[in-house]
Image (tube, helix red, strand yellow):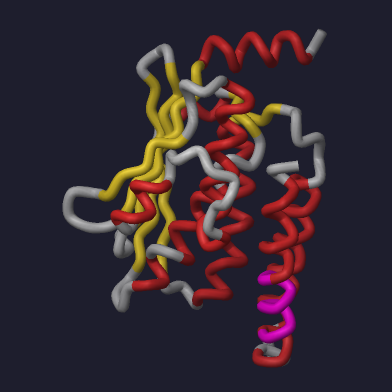
Amino acid sequence: ALQLQINPHFLFNTLQTLDFKAMEYTHKPTAVNQMIEALSDILKYSLQNPHSMVTLKDEIDYLKKYDSIQRYRYEDKYILYYEYEKELESIPIMRLILQPLIENAVIHGTSKISGKGIIAILGSTDGVDLQICVKDNGPGFSQEFMENFFKDSQQKPSTAYGIYNIDKRLKLYYGEDHGLIIQNNENNGACVMIRLPLRLVEKTIEKAGN
């Protein structure tokens, strides 16, 4: 249920963009066709079993399609890049835990600055945990937001519901010791860190296949 709550919001924004671009680029139907194709793939991925696991590569491939749509919407005002070792691509992770973090980085981060926005997805492992960090060069989290993020409250600001959603999903699946780590970068921008225990993930995948 937590996962499915984020999908209609993105779909609504995408359809608005499609409508606008269809009128603006009637002489460039290819651009609209690409958006429709990407949206179709995104919906197909989103509507699969929410309890099933995917690989990091699956999630990154999904993000690339999501990013291709956002680039039309924000007119290439930001760049998204990935940095991780190739062997990490086969690691199983929860489905749709990165897209809300990218959306948050765009809407509340890079779209708020006048220069070129930069969002980085950094992956690493220490052999025990998989660490995924999403960084941006936006204005960063407000002090009030950071103070309230971990408070046990059912009333969460709708402007940042996506990251609350992911934090809750991680805690429900991996336990209260896990979830998101949020902080501001030393110079500017925000950083959201996910830590996933590799042993528990691999064990869950093995059970699911039996």
| Position of residue 110 in the picture relative to residue 88 (left or right) | left
Q: Is residue 151 above or below residue 196?
A: below
Residue at x 50%, y 53% (from the top left corner): 102
Q: Read off the magenta span.
A: 13-20
Residue in view at x 57 percent, y 75 percent = 73
Observer-nearest residue: 200 or 173? 173
Which quadrant of the figure contains the N terminus? Answer: top right
Residue 134 appears in the rendering: yes
Q: Is residue 206 magenta?
A: no
Across and down, in percent, residue 157 comes to 53, 58
| Residue 53 percent location from the top left of the image | 69, 27
Foreground residue among 210 and 81: 210
Q: Tell which of 43 and 22 is nearer to you.
A: 43
Q: Quadrant of the C terminus?
A: top right
Question: Where residue 151 appears, x then y in whole percent?
Answer: 45, 40
Q: Residue lying at the far left in this picture: please name it.
A: 187
